[in-house]
Amino acid sequence: MTTTRSAPSATVLRPPRHRVARRAVVWWSTRILSGTALAAGAPALAALAVPALGTPPEVLTTALWWAAAALGGAGLATAAVVPQWRFRVHRWEVTDTAVYTASGWLWQEWRVAPMSRVQTVDTQRGPLQRLFRLADVVVTTASAAGPISIKGIDGDRARSVAAELTEAAHNTEGDAT
C-alpha cells in the first residue's frame, strides 16, 4: 500500500501579526468599569434606601453593603486584568489570500477566512468606540462559524482595512459559498 502526499501549500499558517490599537485597553476598561458601577451601585443604592422604609434589619443593610463591595472589587480586579490580557492576545492580519484573527481570553480562538469566502465587510462603532476613535471590522463569510471580527482597531485604519478587504474579495475568484 502506497500513500501519496500532496505538495505543501503555499499558504503558511502563522499567528496574525497586527495588534489592536493601544486605546482598546482603555475602551475595554471603561466598558468593564461602567458595568461594575451599575452592578455595585444597585445594592449600594438599596442599602441607602432601605432605612427610609422603616427600621430595617441591620443584617439586610450590611449584606447589601457587602454585596456592593464584592461586586465593586470583582469589577475592579477584572478591569485591571482582562483588558491587558486581551491586548496581548488579540491580533489580526489581512493578506492577499485570507483574513486572520486571534482573540479570546480564557478560551482563545484563531480564525482564518480565505478571501474567496468573504461575503460582506462592515465597520461598527459604538458611542464609546467613537469617543476613543476605535472601530470593529466585521467580515461575514460563507461559514457556519459566523463572522470574523477585528475588534478595537483605530477608526481610520478600520475604514482602510474594510476598503482593502472589499477590493480583495471582489478581485478574488470564487463564489463565497
Image: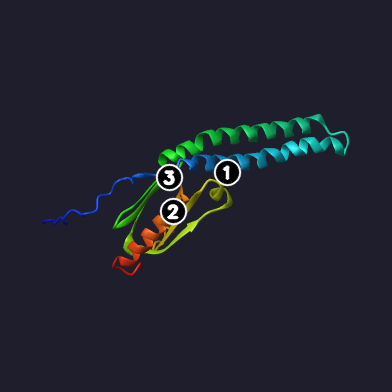
Kindly indicate the quadrant of the structure image that contains residue 52: top right
Amino acid identity at mark 1: Arg
Which mark is on residue 20?
A: 3
Mark 3 to mark 1 CA distance (whole Å): 16 Å
Mark 3 / mark 2, whichever is N-terminal? 3
Q: Is residue 79 left or right of residue 59?
A: left
Write the residue at 56% across / 53% down.
Answer: 126
Q: What element carries label 1?
A: helix
- Counting other residues with Cα less than 10 Å from the Cα at mark 1, is it few (<14), some (14-19), or many (20 or more)? some
- Counting other residues with Cα less than 10 Å from the Cα at mark 2, is it few (<14), some (14-19), or many (20 or more)? many
Reading the image, the residue beneath label 2 is 158
As drawn, 138 above or below 68: below
Amino acid identity at mark 2: Ala
Reading the image, the residue beneath label 1 is 31
Q: What element carries label 3?
A: loop
Write the residue at 77% across / 39% down.
Answer: 46
Kindly indicate the quadrant of the structure image that contains residue 75: top right
Mark 3 to mark 2 CA distance (whole Å): 10 Å
Q: In this view, does 161 lie to the left or right of 128?
A: left
Q: What element carries label 2?
A: helix
Mark 1 / mark 2, whichever is N-terminal? 1
- Report the residue that reaches farthest toward the left: 2
Is residue 149 in view from this perspective? no
